[in-house]
Amino acid sequence: MSSQYNICQLCPRVCKADRQEGQKGICGVSADLKVARAALHYWEETCISGKSGSGTVFFCGCSLHCVFCQNQSIANGSAGKEIPKERLPEIFLELQEQGANNINLVTPGHYIPHIVWSVERAKNQGLRIPIVYNTSSYEKVESLKQLEGIVDIYLPDFKYWSPGLAARYSHAPDYPKVARAAIAEMVRQQPKPEFFTKQDGGFDIMSKGVIVRQLLLPGQLRDARQIVRYLYETYGNQIYLSLMSQFTPLSNLENYPELNRRVSRRVYERYVDYAISLGVENGFIQEGNVAEESFIPEFDGEGV
């Protein structure tokens, strides 16, 4: 499909796998499209999901491989279904027909050439809803530039400020530097949040913009505060911040005992209060106990 899959250098790992010939990269997949689920999803930020849901497409494979990943079965490429490239734009159109507010591409960076082709094809066939790019932010700026005019809403994580934490939990000490550059490119492409005039179930629905997610990890309030401070000082209320408390310790963290617990409500409230004290106005917070495994969908091939 694309020479970019030969000697693949799409992500910052630059593993140079010949994915076009079937070799798997660090992302865990070849150039063949592999998707685990395509369905309406109701647990994103309210301006993304609304009442009708976000048309979420979970791609298999990931270049970051965080030790606490909640989607490990698809991140390592072991789950999911291979589909022909022609099927992906069909999926987009089917989700639109189901009433989705947008097409939400989850961990799609290693399939950027397919994404560009599929979105353009779907738009030619009547796709009208926004494209959301849901990413860890471990992305090369050169790769993101290919998405200009394709992606309407960027939904990146900013996981770590400390290179040491990034090395321990994602084997990527360069993550903070990479994420800063990636988010800067996203904001360059979508410098101003915009919303549809029509609401969905009382919720304003975003049509363009950037929402940066920051998941508070156990014991890492200081690191999280540094991220929020950087984002606010750099972008002000030009972007939205999503302050997340939903960290869920799963069964594979025996080598990381410091992560084998949830974030307390008291600590999360200190995190939110800090953001407010900085002047953050465009933000989302999580209420109640959202750290439940029930928020992790079944990757059973639905809609694929």
Image (spheres, rainbow, N blue to C red):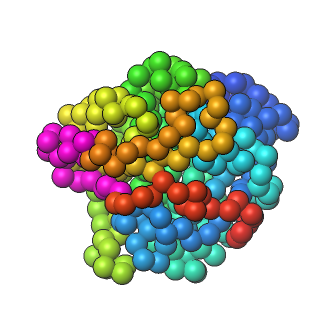
Q: Residue 29: percent from the left, percent from the top?
A: 76, 41
- In this rendered view, identify the residue nearer to me: 141 or 53: 53
User: Based on the displayed image, in which of its 4 quarters is residue 112 positioned?
Assistant: top right
Q: Residue 172, can we see it?
A: no
Residue drawn at 56 percent across, 43 percent down: 249
Residue 278 in magenta stretch:
yes
Above/below status of 110 relative to 292: above
| Quarter of the image that includes the C terminus | bottom right
- In this rendered view, identify the residue nearer to me: 251 or 179: 251
Q: Residue 67, can we see it?
A: yes
- In this rendered view, identify the residue nearer to me: 150 or 158: 158
Residue drawn at 20 percent across, 45 percent down: 273
Above/below status of 219 relative to 153: above
Residue drawn at 47 percent across, 78 percent down: 52
Residue drawn at 37 percent across, 45 percent down: 264
Residue 38 in magenta stretch:
no
**Magenta extent:** 270-286
Above/below status of 195 relative to 219: below
Q: Is residue 23 left or right of residue 283?
A: right
Q: Is residue 278 left or right of residue 259?
A: left
Q: Is residue 98 left or right of residue 273?
A: right
Q: Residue 211: percent from the left, percent from the top?
A: 36, 51
Q: Residue 12: percent from the left, percent from the top?
A: 57, 27
Q: Residue 176: percent from the left, percent from the top?
A: 43, 26
User: Based on the displayed image, in which of its 4 quarters is residue 25 positioned?
Assistant: top right
